């Protein structure tokens, strides 16, 4: 009775309440036709163009610049960017759907999306009109190979511990120091870099810059890692590396907040990538369970394997809902830092659970480098490390709950 009155009071549509059980807008878990079409396009591209070469590309550590360009032509980097700058404004949820499909085929190719959208979105949010016109379209089309340089040898989770400095010299800044573990570092020709313009100020002394990396004073070194082999990773060293003052984003001292804002967007891409790996590992495990016969029966009939499959699915589905919620909030322009951290944490853990479970189910075929599960296992690990480790996400979530520091600040 009370609820009936409440429903009547919260709607003025005058439905016949006896026939309409909910009587007002209900939560909607369906994707729109538009988003389904976006997802299907990305799936088709990933299955036809990325998946067939994934094992070879991983083994040979190929950087697939051709595929990076094709994804740009398809509009995959433009979903949060207005048409004026070459985008399509399909939204954050569209980005998440595309990213999951790409990562399901080959996780390393997902990184490429993040390297384009990270700088593009940050320029859009904090850049001048001139900076946006000059730099965003190239990132959206894939003509510019993007990156964002935050991490240093002694500054990983603790971003404010970075030591790179940017000293004003006439119409330029001179950068000194270095960045480590920078995705696309060896190949980028346009990205963000964060440095201290005033080291005495800690968080408030950091500034953000966009550079085409073409000036002298930059040394690049390629780095090797366990997974994500097709995503070139590098160390950048700056010796009086020049960046025009006109390329600074915001004011001097805005860098830390710009960086935190940027990480909140790019974390969502990582979360979506982790969903793709979780799904790929689960699909491999289910398919193998239905083929492999041991002790006279399909191994899917063993309850211990059913236990793993059920847990994989529950973790993956829960993470997907959380990631979709964060993306939906972003599309509604509502605060979503907390929800993004929850989604990123859940998806990274789901990917690792799934890769580990798939390895157990496939046994030697999982461990073998001739089959993809060992690649999922290696690539899944990255999601517990990049864009704020699982521990950083847990810290953000717990400290928000405990009232120590609010997650939704921007
Ligand atoms: O009081 P105030 O005015 O000085 O401001 C403080 C705070 O309000 C100040 O920063 C502000 N702030 C924010 N402002 C807006 C903090 N967070 C935000 C925010 N979200 N929005 C200092 O705040 P604090 O809380 O004292 O900062 P902290 O303790 O130094 O750091 C916080 C934290 C640990 C969360 C942060 O450093 C962090 O996120 N660390 C993780 C670093 C990370 O994610 N790195 C990723 C590197 S890039 C990468 O992994 C590439 C992967 C590529 C791929 O695979 O796609």
Image: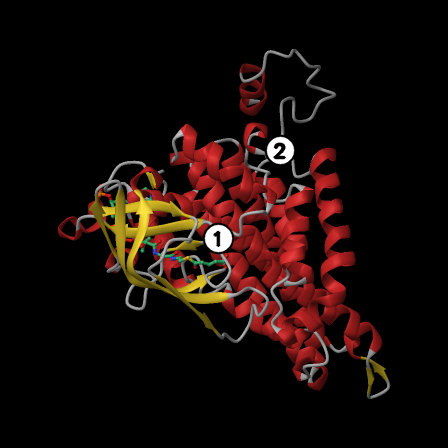
Q: Is residue 171 above or below residue 360?
A: above
Q: 208 or 241, which is in the foreground?
A: 241
**Image-based side of 359 in relation to 298, left or right:** left
- Count neighbours of disc 1 (C-alpha within 10 A) and say few if under 14, some if 14 to 19, many if 20 or more: some
Marks 1,2: beta carbons within 8 A: no
Residue at 78%, 74% in the rendered image? 289
Distance, label 1 to label 2, CA atoms, is: 23 Å
Across and down, in percent, residue 22 comes to 65, 26
The image quarter in which residue 249 lies: top left
Q: Is residue 362 visible?
A: yes
The image quarter in which residue 207 lies: top left
Q: Is residue 334 visible?
A: no
Residue at 72%, 82% in the rendered image? 365
Q: Is residue 312 above or below residue 90?
A: below
Where does the N terminus fall, quadrant-wise? Answer: top right
Q: Which mark is residue 86?
A: none
Q: Which residue is mark 2?
A: 88
Mark 1 or 2, nearer chain start: 2
**Image-based side of 10 in relation to 53, left or right:** left
Residue at 59%, 38% in the rendered image? 79
Q: 140 or 106, which is in the foreground?
A: 140
Across and down, in percent, residue 107 comes to 61, 62
Front label number (1 vs 2): 1
Across and down, in percent, residue 51 comes to 73, 63
Q: Which residue is mark 1?
A: 189
Q: Secondary structure at mark 2?
A: loop
């Amino acid at each position: 009775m009370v609820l009936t009155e409440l429903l009547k009071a919260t709607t003025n549509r005058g439905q016949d309440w006896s026939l309409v059980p909910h009587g007002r807008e209900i939560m909607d878990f369906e994707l729109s036709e538009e988003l389904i079409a976006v997802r299907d396009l990305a799936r088709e591209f990933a299955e036809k163009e990325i998946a067939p070469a994934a094992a070879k590309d991983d083994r040979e550590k190929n950087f697939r610049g051709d595929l990076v360009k094709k994804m740009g032509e398809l509009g995959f980097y433009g979903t949060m960017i207005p048409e004026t700058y070459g985008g399509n404004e399909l939204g954050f949820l569209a980005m998440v759907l595309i990213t999951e499909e790409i990562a399901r085929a080959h996780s390393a190719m997902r990184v490429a999306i993040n390297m384009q959208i990270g700088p593009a979105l940050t320029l859009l949010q904090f850049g001048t009109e001139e900076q946006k016109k000059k730099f965003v379209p190239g990132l959206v089309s894939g003509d510019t190979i993007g990156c964002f340089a935050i991490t240093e040898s002694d500054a990983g989770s603790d971003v404010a511990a970075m030591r790179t400095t940017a000293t004003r010299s006439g119409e330029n800044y001179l950068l000194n120091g270095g960045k480590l573990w920078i995705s696309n570092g060896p190949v980028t020709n346009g990205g963000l870099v964060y440095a201290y313009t005033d080291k005495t100020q800690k968080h408030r002394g950091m500034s953000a810059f966009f550079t085409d990396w073409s000036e002298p004073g930059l040394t690049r070194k390629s780095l090797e890692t366990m997974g994500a082999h097709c995503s070139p990773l590098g160390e950048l060293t700056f010796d009086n590396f020049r960046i025009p003052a006109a390329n600074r984003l915001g004011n001097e001292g805005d860098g830390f907040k710009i960086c935190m804002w940027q990480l909140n967007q790019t974390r969502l891409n990582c979360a979506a990538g982790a969903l793709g790996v979780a799904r790929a590992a689960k699909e491999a495990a289910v398919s193998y369970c239905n083929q492999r016969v041991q002790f006279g029966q399909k191994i899917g009939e063993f309850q211990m394997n059913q236990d793993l499959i059920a847990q994989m699915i529950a973790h993956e589905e829960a993470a997907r809902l959380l990631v979709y919620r964060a993306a939906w909030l972003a599309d509604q322009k509502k605060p979503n830092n907390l929800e993004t951290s929850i989604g990123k944490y859940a998806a990274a853990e789901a990917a690792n659970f799934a890769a580990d479970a798939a390895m157990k189910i496939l046994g030697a075929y999982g461990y073998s480098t001739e089959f993809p599960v060992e690649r999922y296992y290696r690539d899944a690990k990255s999601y517990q490390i990049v864009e704020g480790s699982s521990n950083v996400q847990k810290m953000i979530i717990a400290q928000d709950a405990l009232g120590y520091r609010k997650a939704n600040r921007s």
